[in-house]
Amino acid sequence: MDGRCYLLETLTSDALYRIHLATIEILQSIGVKIDHEGALRALADAGADVDPKNKIARLQEYHVKEALRKAPSAFNLYGRNRRNLLRLGGNRVHFSTAGSAVFVLDFDTGKRRYATLKDTALLTRLADGLGNIDHVSEMVFPSDVPEGAMHAYEIVERFRNTEKTTDGYTFGKTEALDTIKIASTVLGGEEELRKRPTLLGFHNPTSPLTHSEDGLDGLKVYGEYGQPVIIAPEAQGAMTAPATLAGLLSQTNAEILSGIVIAELFNPGAPVLYGTVSAIADARTGNIALGGPETGLINVAHGQMSRYYGIPSRGTGGVTDANVLGVQSGIEQATTLILAALAGINFIYYAGGPHIESTKTVSYEQLVIGNELCGMVSRILRGIEVTDETLAVDVTRKIGPGGMFIGHKHTLEHFNENFIPTIMNRETREAWERKGSKGMQDASKETIKGILSNHHPMPLDQGVEKELSVIIKDVEQRASRSSKRQLSSIG
């Protein structure tokens, strides 16, 4: 989405500035823990106050300003088909699926089971065929491949099944380099990958105020190859962050900005997104409340803060804590998505689903429902265009009192201005009953069957497939050797 009718805001300019000042105080007086020797050295060389024994770095405001000056305010992310391009920054809003689910609601039985590599392939191809989904994430952790090689299997399967933009994998230096090799093979070499960044990485600071070694290793590798990385804390208010939203925002802002400082010290000009996956803890259970209204408020504030710093934003919308598809999931997903979109979040993760149970489980049907919701939100974001053509005074004059507009040329030319649902029903009860009284889940299943039967992305070149098979085999053998060493050390 390129257009904006308006931006939703919840923070005054004074509130924004106070959060910034609180963040700088946190960075200066408390500091952040950094489990990475290279990052600590880089910060020390840049003039930060570094305590190597406790791995604490205290930053000054000028470190933040210098990093923000180097980081691009907008950049491109490409699919393997170069026509699939996302411009991240400005007022653009893009909708993504999301990742990391361990379970799947089986499409045939409806029962929950562990995700498999086949699910990766089918969900990716389904998302590729859904028109309102801009970006295809990993969505599940397949359980039927070696754990140490899962990242390679999973990303190869996504490249096979989508031409849209997709995720990389940045949890560890070796794993990040594996994905660089895979993407370079698909695109035709490292130089081509640098020209057309194709992997979207993730660095999730550990709240409160900690950066892990594996996360920073991946951040460094992706920056070296020009691949963008989202820096996104997953703080939980009242658990790993203050219970107050202002306190949560101040802390996570310190986590994000310190991550940006490190990224730009590692690789000046590295593309990064100002991200969040934060929410509150439910006061009764202590569980994360991703579907709560607070998630929407955090994203609204987050959109304002990303614009304050001039960095493209990544937020969370379309999320639910419900265990089944139904009224609760619909309310939570719609509320969190519309707030994130109206806040101007550039890249909304989870927007197209397909998760339930606070992202633990994937539902095929939910992916189709999420696509429908993204279509509705896209229409809202387009707003109302007011021109002589759209005001249509001459058309109204011609039709006159008591007339009907349906047959006029102007109507036919402008029908596409309005949202046309694909799985929601607007028929009369009688017509709906004649067709079997189908609900959204029934309609979504029909859509799933249709796309998986008829939609096939352009296959990878056979030579590329052979190279990818060799890479996966090498990664799997390395993972096997590592596993044997670990077992030997335990024994």
Image (spheres, rainbow, N blue to C red):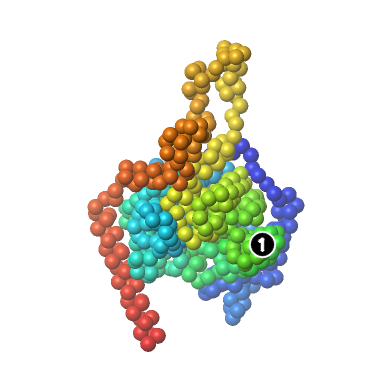
- In this picture, residue 397 sits left or right of residue 138: right
Q: Residue at coordinates 57% horizontally, 52% vertically from top-left?
A: 328
Local secondary structure at mark 1 = helix
Q: Is residue 104 above or below residue 52?
A: above
Q: Which residue is mark 1?
A: 248
Q: Position of residue 248 (x, y in %)?
A: 66, 62
Q: Is residue 320 above or below residue 342?
A: below
Q: Position of residue 95 (x, y in %)?
A: 50, 47
Asked if one can make out residue 81 in the rendered structure from this viewpoint, the answer is no
Asked if one can make out residue 419 in the rendered structure from this viewpoint, the answer is yes
Q: Is residue 384 above or below residue 366?
A: above
Q: Residue at coordinates 59% horizontally, 24% vertically from top-left?
A: 387
Q: Position of residue 390 (x, y in %)?
A: 57, 23
Seen from this angle, which residue lies furthest bottom? 491
- Determine which quarter of the picture holds residue 295: bottom right
Residue toward you, 99 or 323: 323
Q: Residues within 10 Å of mark 1 (few under 14, many from 20)?
A: many
Which quadrant is the C terminus positioned in? bottom left
- In this picture, residue 250 sits left or right of residue 260: right
Q: Residue at coordinates 40% horizontally, 85% vertically from top-left?
A: 490
Q: Residue at coordinates 62% horizontally, 13% vertically from top-left?
A: 401
- In this picture, residue 63 sits left or right of residue 112: right
Q: Position of residue 2 (x, y in %)?
A: 53, 39
The three-letter code of the residue at mark 1 reads Leu
